[in-house]
Image (tube, rainbow, N blue to C red):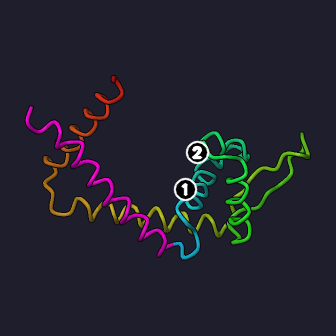
């Protein structure tokens, strides 16, 4: 098939553009947080119905404990999280987002919705559905390999 070598290249190029735009905009929105910090903060907020510990973040992001500790320390210094002792084990500290973190998270979600809307601007709904169907099929094909 003539296009099979082009598909991956086009997806990579598009992915690179999207990531570059998101990172640039995210840095402007947060003014203080880098990509790792904002991703971890989002994880803490989105998993807020249960207690979140350092080991949970370590598992979710497959990042070394020392790196996560450094990121959490900076988030604490910026006032986005607090660490609270757990009654059952004083050595454990659960990570709790602050009100400031929830406000920032809402702003970031709004920004992502705006970016999504700008990416599909001018694209017919049927074309967009076809595009999404195709990328889901490509993803399934890659899962089977």
**Is the residue 6 above or below the residue 116 in the image?**
above
Q: Which residue occupies 91% across, 46% down?
A: 90
Residue 32 placement (x, y as % from top left)? 58, 74
Q: Which residue is mark 1?
A: 39
Magenta: main secondary structure: helix
Question: Where are the magenta residues, as a range?
Answer: 1-29
Number of the front mark, 2 or 1: 2
Q: Is residue 111 above or below residue 7?
A: below
Label 2 vs 1, first from the N-terminus: 1
- Name the element at disc 1: helix
- Asked if marks 2 and 1 touch (Cβ < 8 Å), the reply is yes
Q: Which mark is residue 74?
A: none
Q: Counting other residues with Cα less than 10 Å from the Cα at mark 1, is it few (<14), some (14-19), or many (20 or more)?
A: few
How far from the left and from the top, in percent, is residue 66?
A: 73, 52
Disc 2 secondary structure class: helix
In the rendered image, the quadrant that contains the N terminus is top left
Up the image or down, 18 lies above or below 1; here it is below
Q: Position of residue 70 (x, y in %)?
A: 71, 59
Disc 2 packing (10 Å; few <14; some 14–19; many ≥20)? few
Question: Which disc, if any, is residue 61?
Answer: 2
20 part of magenta stretch: yes
> Which residue occupies the foreground of this view, 14 or 40?
14
Question: In the drawing, does residue 118 fall left or right of residue 76?
Answer: left
Kindly report the distance in space between the C-alpha atoms of the residues bearing marks 2 and 1. 9 Å
Residue 61 picture location, percent across and down? 58, 45
> Residue at coordinates 15% horizontally, 57% vertically from top-left?
123
Residue at position x 32%, y 53% from top?
15
């Amino acid at each position: 098939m003539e296009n099979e070598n082009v598909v991956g290249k086009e997806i990579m190029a598009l992915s690179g553009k999207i990531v570059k735009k998101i990172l640039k905009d995210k840095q402007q929105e947060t003014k203080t947080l880098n990509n790792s910090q904002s991703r971890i903060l989002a994880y803490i907020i989105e998993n807020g119905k249960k207690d979140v510990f350092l080991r949970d973040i370590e598992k979710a992001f497959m990042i070394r404990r020392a790196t996560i500790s450094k990121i959490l320390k900076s988030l604490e210094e910026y006032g986005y999280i607090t660490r609270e002792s757990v009654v059952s084990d004083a050595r454990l500290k659960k990570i709790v987002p602050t009100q400031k973190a929830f406000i920032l998270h809402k702003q970031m979600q709004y920004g992502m919705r705006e970016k999504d809307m700008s990416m599909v601007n001018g694209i017919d709904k049927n074309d967009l559905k076809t595009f999404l169907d195709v990328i889901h099929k490509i993803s399934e094909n890659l899962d089977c390999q």
